[in-house]
Image (tube, rainbow, N blue to C red):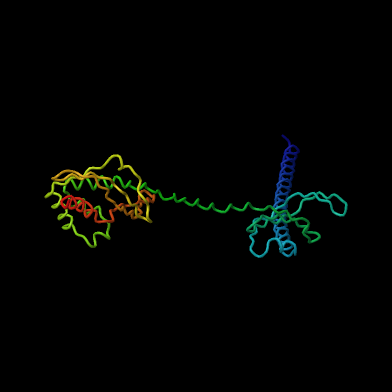
């Protein structure tokens, strides 16, 4: 290899190094310019958002809509088509999104003219008022059928014939009990025992309905009164007093009528026996 060949090789290497350096420098300059451009775009976007927000919040119509209690959700960009002075305009605008209690508002801002070009409002669905609980219907009171006075008379006959002073005394009203004691019932039963008295209903007349006088029913019972010397039919009046009462059970109200004998009916029985002795 001659001296000339060596010089050519060296020259080629030098040219290659220079070209590589120029290429690398160009790449770095391009990247630097790209970074500067990106930063510039971001800064520009921030400036546009701030400007759009300022224009929107100072607009009189916007103030009426959003009031003082609002929240900025976002500043973005959106496309809007509109007719302005007979000309159709299709353009991207900065949009300020404002949240209020009753709506979300999309405010389109024209940065160049510093005006609000459109306000889109989406109203929030108001929650339905809570349903009022259905009032519980109170069922009407249940009125119990009063005991038929004939049943009262039958119980009286039963306890009289059994000489049961306690049960008989319980059958009388409070008015009678004020003037008579259970000892008085015992005396009447002693009289019945001495004269071997027993009572029996006369079936032909026993089913007759009584007569109502206020809260008292006068029930006339035709009885056969048997005693030591024979038997005699007699009509004995049983005034049955019905005392109203109420009772609560299982969320229901019951109205009943407690029957009570409101006369000292022993006098009528005793009178029949004494009349027979006088005869």
Q: How many marks?
A: 0
Q: Position of 148 compared to 69: left or right? A: left
Q: Position of residue 109 (x, y in %)?
A: 76, 57
Q: What's the residue at 35%, 48% (across, down)?
A: 210
Q: Nearer the viewer, residue 47 or 2?
A: 47
Give the position of the N terminus as an image quadrant.
top right
- Toward the right, the furthest residue is 86
Q: Position of 41 compared to 162: left or right? A: right
- Toward the top, the furthest residue is 1
- Toward the left, the furthest residue is 194
Q: Nearer the viewer, residue 4 or 95?
A: 95
Q: Position of residue 159 (x, y in %)?
A: 20, 47
Q: What's the residue at 73%, 45% (across, down)?
A: 23
Q: Position of 176 compared to 12: left or right? A: left
* Image quadrant assignment for residue 222: top left
Q: What's the residue at 34%, 44% (across, down)?
A: 208
Q: What's the residue at 80%, 49% (across, down)?
A: 81
Q: Position of residue 105 (x, y in %)?
A: 69, 55
Q: Nearer the viewer, residue 30 or 222?
A: 222
Q: Position of residue 232 (x, y in %)?
A: 21, 45
Q: Is residue 198 above or below residue 113?
A: above
Q: Nearer the viewer, residue 32 or 94?
A: 94
């Amino acid at each position: 290899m001659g001296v000339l060949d060596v010089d050519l090789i060296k020259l080629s290497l030098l040219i290659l190094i220079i070209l590589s350096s120029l290429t690398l420098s160009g790449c770095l300059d391009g990247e630097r310019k790209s970074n500067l451009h990106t930063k510039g775009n971001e800064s520009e976007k921030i400036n546009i958002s701030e400007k759009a927000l300022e224009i929107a919040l100072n607009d009189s119509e916007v103030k009426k809509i959003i009031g003082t209690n609002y929240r900025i959700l976002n500043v973005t960009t959106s496309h809007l088509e509109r007719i302005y002075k007979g000309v159709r305009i299709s353009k991207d605008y900065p949009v300020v999104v404002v949240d209020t209690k009753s709506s979300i508002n999309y405010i389109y801002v024209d940065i160049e003219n510093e005006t609000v070009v459109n306000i889109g409002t989406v109203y929030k669905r108001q929650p339905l008022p809570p349903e009022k609980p259905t009032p519980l219907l109170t069922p009407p009171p249940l009125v119990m059928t009063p005991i038929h006075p004939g049943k009262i008379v039958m119980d009286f006959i039963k306890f009289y014939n059994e000489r049961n002073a306690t049960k008989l005394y319980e059958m009388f009203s409070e008015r009678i009990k004020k003037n008579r004691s259970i000892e008085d019932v015992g005396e009447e039963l002693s009289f019945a025992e001495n004269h071997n008295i027993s009572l029996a209903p006369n079936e032909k007349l026993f089913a007759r309905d009584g007569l109502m006088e206020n809260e008292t029913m006068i029930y006339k019972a035709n009885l056969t009164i048997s005693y030591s010397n024979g038997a005699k039919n007699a009509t004995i009046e049983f005034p049955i007093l019905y005392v109203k009462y109420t009772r609560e059970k299982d969320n229901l109200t019951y109205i009943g009528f407690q029957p009570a004998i409101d006369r000292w009916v022993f006098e009528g029985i005793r009178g029949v026996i004494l009349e027979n002795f006088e005869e």
